[in-house]
Image (cartoon, coloured by chain):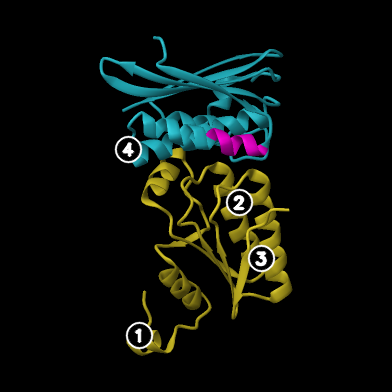
Amino acid sequence: MERIPILKMGDFLLVTIQVDMHDRLAMTLQDDLTERISRTGAHGVLIDISSLEIVDSFIGRMLANIAGMARVLDAATVVVGMQPAVAITLVELGLELPGVRTALDVDKGMRVLRHALGRPTPQEADAGAEG
Amino acid sequence: MPALKDEMLPIRADSDIVLVRQAARSWSIDAGFSLVEQTKMVTAASELARNTLVYGGGGTVRLEALEENGRRGLRLTFEDRGPGIPDLELALRDGFSTGTGLGLGLSGSRRLVNEFSIESQRGEGTRVVIARWR
């Protein structure tokens, strides 16, 4: 069966969605991620959607579900890399992804996760915490 | 208004929704739409194709390339022979859903296009027509 790979890096799980997902594949990713969080005890999930050309209400709901389930399992979620045209369309569609943290790129997303867990990198700690 | 070109696609499975999105993308590009216009049209097509599949039990979409007074456009007609929508006004409201979705399919896709019309007969089916112009 077709699956989207989930990479583990330290305490974090990383997912890059690179295909135009059909609905069942999106549901499988949601289930797989939830299962992996619970099995590995990961405390952060980063989902890179920079290759996605659209986010409709189904994918939006999947992202919100993942963030919700992760929260219940004590993990923070950040969605990174949304294309500007996708963001414009999402808001017009009426989908504002409540409860889903976002960041512009993977770097910034990792920083959001580290801050959420109260562990900035040494450089960031030296520079002082960000607001 | 006669279409410059038209094509009919079936909507019978999840994978057909992906094919409808791809077709809507390539026809939007052919119509000269900007990236944002393309994205809006493809997103609306995705929502309506899913409605056709989930609520209408499957159906078809017809794509038509349009031209009027030098303006190019794209029209999509989604048709199913499902149970129909008993209360259209309610179905067009944000947040209304009888299924597992967010209830944004109809109301949301209406905001993404220039023209939107819906007809539904109980027990006979539903037809939704959307169009976007450059």
Chain letter of mark 2 equals: A
Residue A120 at what x, y percent from top left?
A: 45, 83
Which residue is identified by label 4? B34
Chain letter matching colour cyan: B
Q: Which hue is chain A drawn in?
A: yellow
**Type of amino acid at the residue the image marks with label 4:** Ser
Image: B114 above or below A70: above
Q: In this view, does A107 lie to the left or right of A45?
A: left
**Type of amino acid at the residue the image marks with label 1:** Gly
Mark 4 or 3, which is nearer the eye?
4
Which residue is identified by label 3? A72
A109 or B33, nearer to the observer: B33
Chain letter of mark 1 equals: A
* Magenta stretch encompasses residue B19: yes
Disc 4 + disc 3, Cβ < 8 Å: no
Residue drawn 42% across the image and 40% down it? B39
Mark 2 or 1, which is nearer the eye?
2
Residue A128 is labelled as: 1
Q: What separation in Å lies between label 2 and label 4 (alpha carbons)?
A: 27 Å
Residue projecting furthest to the top: B1
Residue B108 visible: no
Q: Is residue A51 left or right of residue A19?
A: left
Magenta-highlighted residues = B14-20
Residues flagged by tags 1 and 3 on a common chain: yes
Q: What separation in Å lies between label 1 and label 4 (alpha carbons)?
A: 43 Å
